[in-house]
Image: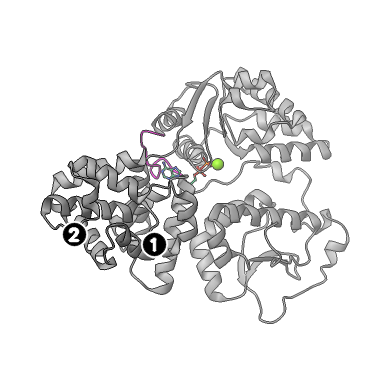
Amino acid sequence: MVGPVSSSQGLSPEDSQSWQRLRGRLKAEVGDAAFNSWLRQLDLTRGRDGRMMMTLPTRFMRDWVISHYAEKIRSLWNDEFDTTAAAEIHVRPAGPRVSEPAPEAAKGAEAGRPTPAGPMSALSDPGAPLDPRFTFENFVVGKTNELAYAASRRAAESPTVPFNPLFLYGGVGLGKTHLMHAIAWHIRERDPDRKVIYLSAEKFMYQFIRALRFKDVMQFKQLFRSVDVLMIDDVQFISGKESTQEEFFHTFNALVDQNRQIIISGDRSPSNLDGMEERMRSRLGWGLVADIHSTDYELRVGILQSKVQHLDAKNVPLQVLEFLAHRITSNVRELEGALNRVLAYSNLVGQAITIDTTQEVLRDLLRSNDRRITIEDIQKRVAEHYNIRISEMHSARRARAVARPRQVAMFLAKQLTSRSLPEIGRKFGGRDHTTVMHAVKRINELRESDSNLAEDVDLLRRMLET
Ligand code: ADP
Ligand code: MG
């Protein structure tokens, strides 16, 4: 359950369900904080003319949501609802929410559809819409995803079928969907005659069940077997769903026989797909299996840099990007979410972005991503590296040979832990927070001018993080 605020008005039970699902997915995508701030009050109603629309209480919220979440909402909307209904967001009238007794809803679920089209109308284009941001150009390549990227490019560019299927797998938020959309965009642009269908395994199942219900299985089969490139995202979804698997298996074989390209993604490798029939698992592993590993620091910085460049957000200092890349290690989706939250906050409050505000805004997220590097670990490593005694971390000596390493350790403590400046000061022999602040500033300056020091810091950070 996503929360009680949305009281969908005048909707069929089916639409209400889709709406709840959409909200749930939206929340999962943008994170709790953003959802609670901006999207919790998003409601779905059906107007007198039978049109569905989303509403928000104020113009400000509406504009904000449109400028920040329109693409996400649109893509979820197209996933959940008939594509005949446009995704529109309006400001809802003040006062109690309009509660219209929608006459159509009383006649049963199907009657409530905005455009009463034939049962198979949804199949005229069974694919899901492509996210315009998910292109090869926008995909940042690093060690962890270079194989998946190269394979995807090959599949997109090759005039023949280079491997069948291409199976991309990896944990959530690591770019599987992005790569699949990128392939589809590329083919659509270069070779518009090739028929490409991209959809989630969930949607595939939905279409299939719908076809069974309306006794249109022939049309379903024809449709899916007439494509040049079939892409099924998140195939793990049909684990344990036997009849869908069966149908998918036949579709798969028919396409392979005709030498059509199949591209599949999953959250684990074919052989580890529990709940998938053995013959299916083995088929899925026939072609090229490319995994996407968890991100590394370099890739995270690269992604953040490319993102701020795109958003033209020049007010984010590199330090903040580095800080985020250090601290949000779970996946790219969370990383992007964190950056968006920081940008949203600074837009709203009109404050410059600093590491402090970033820590403030992302407190909850940072906690959950905390790898628990302790200040003691940092002091120990830094002391070892510079060949000084650990006790010098706490001592009052100001000789450069010990003061500089101490500053490096303070800097790393600020970067790699969630400790506040006063807390850090206390761990360094009870120093004042301004001393820590000064150390952080000084090391940042020196990193620009002193490449040895920059390397030391980088090396220490790496050692601490692995
Ligand atoms: P998955 O399908 O593996 O769960 P997505 O493809 O939906 O993950 O990626 C989650 C988010 O992270 C998307 O907004 C996507 O654009 C972004 N992303 C993931 N990897 C990269 C990358 N290498 N470069 C740029 N953006 C990326
Ligand atoms: Mg995905």
The residue located at (51%, 24%) in the rendering is: 289
Between 125 and 137, the one nearer to me in the picture: 137
Quadrant position of residue 279: top right
In the image, 124 versus 350, the foreground residue is 350
Q: Earlier in the sequence, mark 1 or mark 2?
A: 1
Secondary structure of the residue carrying tag 2 is loop
In the displayed structure, 97 sits above or below 281; it is: below
**Quadrant of the drawing holding the C terminus:** top left
Instruction: Give the quadrant of the N terminus.
Output: bottom right
Label 1, label 2: how far apart the Cα atoms are: 31 Å
Pick the front one: 405 or 427: 427
**Residue 165 in the image, given as x and y percentages of width and height:** 55, 24
Report which residue position mark 1 lands on: 358
Residue visible at 13% across and 58% down in the picture: 398
In magenta stretch: residue 136? yes
Q: Main secondary structure of the magenta part?
A: loop
Is 9 left or right of 78, judged from the image as shown?
Answer: right
Against 48, residue 393 (above or below) is above
Kind of residue sitting beneath label 2? Ala
Q: Nearer the viewer, mark 1 or mark 2?
A: 2
- Residue 158 as seen in the image, left or right of residue 321: right
- Left or right: 295 as drawn, with respect to 12: left
Which residue is found at the position 51% from the left and 48% from the top? 131
Residue 231: x, y in percent?
58, 33
Horizontally, residue 384 falls left or right of residue 236, namely: left
Residue 400 located within the stretch drawn in magenta = no
Amino acid type, label 1 = Thr
Outermost residue, right direction? 107
Residue at the location (83% across, 71% down)? 101
Please give the range of residues in magenta. 134-144
Q: According to the image, label 2 marks what residue?
A: 396
Within 10 Å of disc 1 (Cα), the crowding (few <14, some 14-19, many 20+) is many
